[in-house]
Amino acid sequence: MEQLKRFYQKQRPIFVALVLVVAIPTVLFVISIIVTVEAKKQVKILSAEQEVLTNEKQQLTATLSATKKSYDALKSEDQYKINQQLKADIKKTHDVYANSITAYEGILELQAKKQDISKLSILYATIVKELSDLNHASAEGDLVSLNSQIKKIKDDLAAKEAALQAAGAPAGPAPENNTAPGSGFSYQSVKTEIGTFTLSIIAADLGSTRVIVDTASDGDCHDNCPVLSLGDYVSRSGAFAGVNGSYFCPASYPSCAGKTNSFDTLLMNKNKTYFNSDNNVYSNVPVAVFGSGFARFIGASSGWGRDTGVDGVIANQPLLLSGGNIAFSGGSDPKQGSKGARSFVGNKGTTVYIGVVYNVTVAEMAYVLKALGLENALNLDSGGSTALWYGGYKAGPGRNIPNAVLFVRK
């Protein structure tokens, strides 16, 4: 046993060497396998990442290419043409909008006359929506349709006004008479070269009557101006007859914002106060002047000074008759070209006339007054303002107005 131990101790290094010779290659082999497997995993991961990067690169390249094409196309566009087209579109939209305001005022006039405007209002709302979308072509087409519908209703209403129900004129047929009354009120039909028309007319001799102009304002007023009914003017001035006065800007009109119930033409009221005396914009507007025993109708306001020795001065347009001849045969204003009840003031010698002609254009009214034998006549406001008083309303009462022409006994 002792010998065996000694033998083992002598041979121990040899045994260790043999174990190492056998074990080390095995361990190295196992390690190499592990390293190879891990390396393959890394290769797969790197390959996948490379594929993702490749795809992203291809997408980025495609995006850059499309962007470059868009940029090149933008550079090749003619910016001048684009700007010109844009300016044209803006102007067209503005023009349609401006015209739509006139149509809307026409709707308001029909509403004031108790007409059904529901369909017109819906169509107008459509036009406004189209304009807000910058679709001016559709808006323009619908505006043509709207104006056509408004005109038809006005024409139908004018035909009814010819029967004198809506205007409050005397009931029954008007006797045909081409002679103007010498005094007082007359309801008659007048035969002219263009047809037969009906009117209410009041005559007064300047020997016993003063023609004055009354105003709700005491002086120039440019916005939120006071207004009164024709009946109020007649009552407070002690007049026996009256008619609505000059054109003004009603508060119900959108285009009158900032200048409601104002008027721009020359006028001298019963207190000898001149209105719009410094206004040169309308210096070419005709003017009617009434004094003791005379009436003058002047073709332009600039031809009249600021004499306060007369009774009344009022400017409006157009001048209908001058020296017995027709001074107005038509113009570009569509409102003057539509039929309706029209107010006027005129004279023949020392007799002054105020009145309303029914179902006429402004130009047609000139023919009626000429057929009556008047020498001079001036158109006054009409539409929703039309009103005539003689012991009560003969036409109207219409809307409240800033001024009126009145007959007052001396």
Image (cartoon, rainbow, N blue to C red):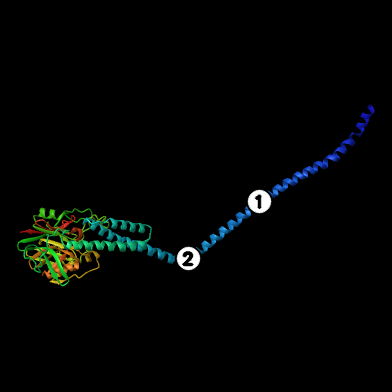
* 17 up-or-down from 220: above or below: above
Q: Which one is in front, 264 or 16? A: 16
**Under tag 1, what secondary structure?**
helix
Circle nearer the viewer, 2 or 1: 1
**Where residue 111 sits in the image (x, y, percent)?**
23, 56
Mark 2: give few (<14), some (14-19) or many (20+) Cα within 10 Å: few
Report the side of 323 relative to 139 (left or right). left
**Where residue 338 sits in the image (x, y, percent)?**
22, 65
* 132 up-or-down from 320: above or below: above
Q: Residue at x 63, y 53 (%)?
A: 53
Can you tell which quarter of the image residue 346 is in? bottom left
For the residue marked with disc 2, what is the amino acid? Glu
Report the side of 400 relative to 15 (left or right). left
Say which residue label 1 marks.
48
- Whether label 2 touches label 1, CB < 8 Å: no
> The N terminus is located in which quarter?
top right
* Disc number placed over residue 77 in the picture, else none: 2
